[in-house]
Image (cartoon, rainbow, N blue to C red):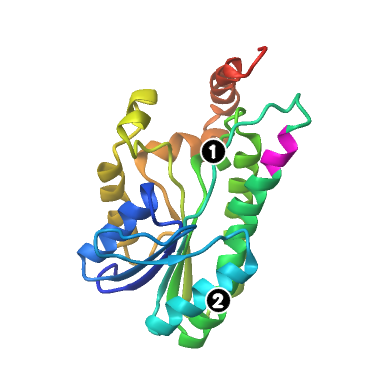
Amino acid sequence: MNITNRTVFIAGGTSGIGLGLARRFAAVGGTVTVGGRRAASLDGLTTVEIDVTNADSVRRARDSVLESHPGLDVVVTMSGVQLSEDLRDPEHFATAETTVETNLLGTIRVLDAFTPHLLGRGAGTFVTVSSGIGFLPFPLMPTYAATKAGVHAYTEALRAQLAGTGVEVTELVPPAVATTPEHKRLNPRAPDLEDYLDEVLGLLGQDPTPDEILVQGVLQHRWAERDGTYADLVAQRSQALKTLPGR
């Protein structure tokens, strides 16, 4: 994928990896619009309000973006929440619903909104965002893991259905990334955001574009079952359950 001079919309691009990716696209000549629950001023980036849990909001955001940028050719579905749950407590279900609505259904809503546009152009790129946790669950965040596994499966199906249309589909699979000093304090092994983005842009820039954007730090997650490390790694990650009340 040629990453220069693209016209990009990033749903969920007002912070973290999404904002970092927006700045990187802009730095190589891109015209970038970022979407979030509240439109805000972001270093010269154009913003639009979008709530991916609301179909009308997604449609309004799409119409606004395409009115201003009819040449849009890259759509990134970055919106997501990462919430812990205690599955022994029935009250967790509200958290599960929120997570599914945002991470999985929100992704599908954005893809559905922009698919006719990219098909009409006969070219363009969808970038979905799953997670290493979709391949190696973090038991403290069970529905998050389930939704990210769902995004992976949906992305595979979308790629198959759009084959031959000129629209490519690639999946960004992040590990834990230190997007703030607090994240780095809590997880010292997490790569810094800029280092992570260096790897991501290098992989995105390959021709052909990889089906999955896998930086070095996520390979142990992606291939845990293949490598025979899955059970041990899940057991290690289950230690975090001790942080739940009463455990």
Closer to the chain start, of discs 2 and 1, is 2
Q: Which residues are magenta?
A: 92-96
Does residue 238 sit above or below 74 in this rendering?
A: above
Q: Residue furthest top?
A: 246
Q: In the rendering, at what x and y percent does residue 225 appear?
A: 58, 35
Q: Is residue 208 left or right of residue 162?
A: left
Q: Quadrant of the C terminus?
A: top right
Report x, y in % for residue 10.
42, 63
SS at badge 1: helix
Q: Is residue 95 magenta?
A: yes
Q: Residues within 10 Å of mark 1 (few under 14, many from 20)?
A: many
Residue in the picture at 56% in, 69% down: 58
- Would you say the residues marked 2 and 1 are in contact, meaning their CB atoms lie under 8 Å apart? no
Q: Residue 234, image x and y in percent?
A: 58, 25
Quadrant where the N terminus lies? bottom left
Q: Which residue is mark 1?
A: 133
Front residue of this view, candidates 8 and 154: 8
Q: At 45% across and 58% down in the image, what residue appears? A: 38
**Element at badge 2?**
helix
- Which quadrant would residue 2 be assigned to in this image? bottom left
In the image, 67 versus 149, the foreground residue is 67
Name the chief secondary structure element in magenta.
Answer: helix
Look at the image and tell me whether residue 156 can be seen: no
Magenta residue check for 141: no
For residue 115, which numbered disc appears in the image? 2
